[in-house]
Amino acid sequence: MQLTFGAKKPLLYWGIAANNFVAAKPISGFSKMFYSQFHPGLTVSTGFNWKEKPKHNLMQSFKAGYFSHRFIQRSIMLYTEFGYRYKAGNNLGLSIAFGGGYLHMIPATQQFKMNDDGTWDQVKLKSRPQGMISLSMGIDYKINAAGWRTFIRYQNMLQTPFVPGYIPLLPYNVLHVGVTVPMSAFKKGGNNAK
């Protein structure tokens, strides 16, 4: 059975990536991903090509992810990205993608409020639905004849509205390191990935 998007677009791969999310301004916060903060996450993905040429792809990906920002939030994400991939050689690809989707924010801290008699009562913080916007750039490399690829991707993500009326946007710099496996690897005896 082949998984497809709509009637004619076969899903080409399954991917998984380990992530580090760093709350910082886009681009200028890139270096902080390696030394200042560690907020781990995991992303799974799949996708298809809208168009494929010998040197170029127009692609669509679908992603589900989770990350934990210590003391701030835990987040579940469902989003899609539309992208362009340049085939720099037989094994190397360079890509850029733009997308957006849904982020569900679960508070990771306790909050207290002083009541009338001077004691503190814990306030239950509710999880909140939010939106996210994504811009990412990446490099991938084919690691075997079956079509497995390893990749590194740098993503700028905006979470909105983080705190309505106070912090409308929370920017993240995200490092993704992962692997994609072609769908053909899951077929019995399948090993004919492009």
Image (cartoon, rainbow, N blue to C red):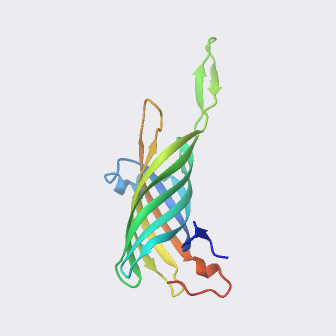
On the image, the x and y values in percent for residue 61 come to: 50, 64
- Kindly identify the residue that appears in the image at 64 percent across and 23 percent down: 121
- Kindly identify the residue that appears in the image at 38 percent across and 68 percent down: 84
Which one is nearer the viewer's eye here, 20 or 193?
Answer: 193
Picture layout, residue 27 above or below residue 44: above
Q: Quadrant of residue 7?
A: bottom right
Residue 4 in view: yes
Q: Quadrant of residue 98?
A: bottom left
On the image, the x and y values in percent for residue 100 come to: 46, 52
On the image, the x and y values in percent for residue 67 come to: 55, 52
Residue 10 in view: no
For the N terminus, the image quarter is: bottom right
Picture layout, residue 86 above or below residue 145: above
On the image, the x and y values in percent for residue 105 come to: 56, 43
The outermost residue toward the front is: 7
Q: Quadrant of residue 16?
A: bottom right
How many marks the image carries: the answer is 0
Picture layout, residue 87 above or below residue 160: below
The outermost residue toward the top is: 117
Left or right position of 37 against 43:
left
Which one is nearer the viewer's eye here, 142 or 189?
Answer: 189
